[in-house]
Image: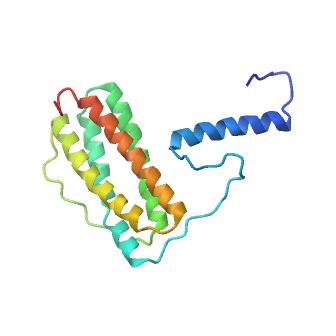
Amino acid sequence: MNFNDEQLPDENSIRQMQRSYAGNIRALQNEENVDTTAPPTTTSPIATDNAELNAIANNIDWETNLTLLNNLLSRTQNRCMRGFIRGLIPLDEKDRDEINSFYTTNRIRRNPSIIGNMPNIFGVALRDYIRNEAELLDGLVQLLYTETDEARKTSIYNIIRRRLDALDTLASFWSSGFFA
């Protein structure tokens, strides 16, 4: 689409720009079932009262995952990896907030998890993070298969896909020395 800076926008050009933007966002979020022509719905997520789902959501250990991500960030010397890991931290917090908005979580603050000695070597820190991420993904998969609301299932599925893509990227950074 070509834009003319001297021409005022009309309804058609604005609509085309919105479609293009919505298509780019959909591709970035990995959501395949979004209709870009339909008006967006603004439904606020309401916490569910299903005890089983709430228990699963409460058992996901987001704090340890964030601590391990910060440790991983401090252990890497590669600027590219550091930038990628730094970008994972706010995504991890958004995923946690999104899951917590779906389910009634106990608002009591947890005691910090004991991680033991924080590894000084990047490979060991990456291994610890991948182990914890696998446990976190296990909890998300349990939520995915237990949840009955389709909108929540789609959101959980998208979170799982993003996290798997991030793990794949992290593994590719270190594949020559870590997984060989």
Residue toward you, 100 or 67: 100
Residue shown at the point (38%, 40%) measured from the top left: 165
* Residue ID at (22%, 40%): 126
Examine the image and state in which quarter residue 22 appears.
top right
Q: Is residue 109 above or below residue 16?
A: below
Q: Residue 80, image x and y in percent?
A: 35, 26
Residue 176 sits above or below residue 145 on the image: above
Q: Is residue 98 left or right of residue 21?
A: left
Q: x%, y% of residue 140?
A: 36, 59
> Residue placed farthest to the left in the image?
117
Q: Can you give x and y, in whole percent of width and height, for residue 153 in the image?
A: 48, 60
Whether 102 is drawn above or below 86: the answer is below
Residue 120 can be seen, yes or no: yes
* Residue at 55% over, 65% down: 45
Q: What residue is at 30 percent from the left and 60 percent from the top?
A: 61
Position of residue 102 in the picture relative to residue 78 (left or right): right
Q: Position of residue 143 (x, y in %)?
A: 39, 64
Q: Is residue 173 above or below residue 129?
A: above
Colouring of the image: rainbow
**Residue 106 in view of the camera:** no
Compared across the picture, whether 43 is left or right of 69 comes to right
Along the line of sight, which residue is nearer the eye, 66 or 47? 47
Task: Name the image quarter holding the C terminus.
Answer: top left
